[in-house]
């Protein structure tokens, strides 16, 4: 009996060691991020595919993308390549005689490293043929690069104070945007998109993205189940979302909407950030955590698929056909000091 027990223990440990070795090899050749591929995305009901409309392109062609999620539970569209007609969206934007604002914060080394490429790529791809005003928020107005702008396009430099920490730069953005939307920015533009500067455009980014409120699916989290999403879980924070709550995880690198809707969003986030600071708290993902809380309470009218803001570090995905915006390589040690 003792001999049989010894053999059983040896077999157990050999099997365990072999299994661990195979797991290490699997993770080496198939990184953890690729495990997302095993999670099904879900699809929209057929009835929703036929009826869902877009404010700029009319009836969406959701049936063109049957293998991805193209709608939300509150019947807002998730915009993927092939589901809309960009020409119709261009004509509708011109018919409405729109001015579209694009805000970007370029503070410290972010200005010298990223702003020029961001603006040059925007001139190539962002709202081509539309009236556009870029609003660059920076503490270094004289250092803003001169970029050749097309007809009907302007660039305005908005001075801001330099914050002590990069986290404070991120969190002050909501308050600064709220004030700007109540001033010239809010008078000049009908729709505004707010973006991070450490990315660049790589494909057409047109009026099909516009709506009263617009949220962007986070490229690293769009396939993950709700319980794995990195919402703020500290109940003391104004950004807290309880387990079992939340719809999607949205990326603060791209959000937007009408001036009135953005005023509500930025006021909510600025107020939440101020409350947390008074309590000695800081949400896990700063203003992005508060943005996600707002969109949980006030559902976005339109959601952009990860094609509209993608990271090459994730690798290839069959559903990502034509990325419109790429993250720049993250060099935090260089730009955040």
Image (cartoon, helix red, strand yellow):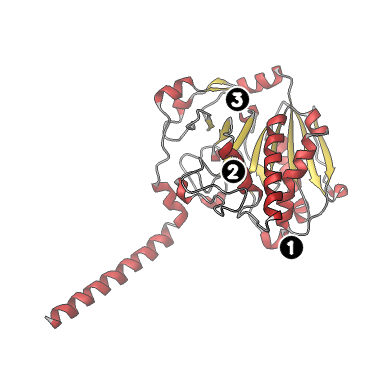
Q: CA distance from mark 2 to mark 3?
A: 31 Å
Callout in the foreground (1, 3): 1
First in sequence, mark 1 or 2: give its number: 2
Q: Position of residue 265 (x, y in %)?
A: 67, 38
Which one is nearer the viewer's eye here, 47 or 204?
A: 47
Residue 143 left/right relative to 331 = right
Q: Position of residue 229 (x, y in %)?
A: 50, 49
Which one is nearer the viewer's eye here, 264 or 254?
A: 264
Element carrying mark 3: helix
Callout in the foreground (2, 3): 2
Camera sees residue 323? no
Contact, mark 1 vs mark 2 (Cβ under 8 Å)? no
Residue at image position (43%, 40%) is 41
Camera sees residue 317? yes
Residue reaching furthest to the top: 95
Residue at image position (70%, 17%) is 95
Q: Position of residue 62 (x, y in %)?
A: 47, 26
Q: Quadrant of the N terminus?
A: bottom left
Residue at numbered disc 1? 337
Residue at numbered disc 3? 86
Quarter holding residue 263: top right
Residue 238 left/right relative to 81 = right
Residue 113 left/right relative to 12 = right
Residue at numbered disc 2? 293
């Amino acid at each position: 009996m003792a001999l049989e027990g010894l053999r059983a223990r040896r077999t157990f440990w050999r099997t365990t060691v072999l299994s661990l070795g195979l797991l290490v090899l699997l993770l080496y050749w198939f990184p953890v991020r690729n495990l997302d591929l095993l999670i099904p995305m879900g699809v929209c009901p057929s009835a929703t595919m036929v009826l869902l409309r877009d404010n700029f392109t009319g009836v969406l062609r959701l049936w063109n993308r049957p293998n991805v999620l193209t709608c939300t539970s509150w019947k807002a569209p998730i915009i993927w390549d092939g589901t809309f007609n960009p020409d119709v969206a261009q004509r509708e934007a011109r018919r409405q005689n729109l001015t579209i604002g694009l805000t970007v914060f370029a503070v410290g080394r972010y200005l010298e490293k990223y702003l020029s490429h961001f603006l040059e790529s925007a001139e190539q791809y962002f709202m081509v043929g539309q009236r556009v005003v870029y609003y660059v928020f920076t503490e270094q107005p004289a250092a803003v690069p001169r970029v050749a702008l097309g007809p009907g396009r302007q660039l305005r430099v908005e001075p801001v104070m330099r914050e002590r920490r990069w986290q404070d730069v991120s969190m002050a953005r909501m308050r600064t945007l709220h004030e700007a939307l109540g001033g010239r920015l809010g008078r000049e533009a009908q729709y505004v998109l707010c973006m991070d500067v450490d990315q660049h455009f790589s494909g057409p980014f047109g009026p099909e993205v516009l709506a009263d409120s617009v949220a962007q699916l986070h490229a690293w989290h769009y396939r993950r189940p709700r319980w794995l999403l990195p919402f703020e879980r500290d109940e003391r924070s104004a950004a807290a979302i309880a387990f079992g709550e939340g719809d999607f995880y949205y990326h603060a690198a791209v959000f937007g909407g009408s001036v009135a809707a953005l005023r509500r969003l930025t006021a909510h986030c600025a107020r939440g950030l101020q409350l947390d600071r008074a309590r000695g708290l800081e949400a896990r993902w700063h203003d992005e955590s508060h943005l996600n809380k707002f969109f949980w309470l006030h559902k976005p009218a339109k959601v952009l698929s990860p094609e509209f803001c993608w990271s090459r570090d994730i690798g290839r995905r069959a559903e990502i056909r034509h990325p419109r915006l790429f993250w720049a390589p993250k060099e935090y040690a260089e730009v955040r000091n």
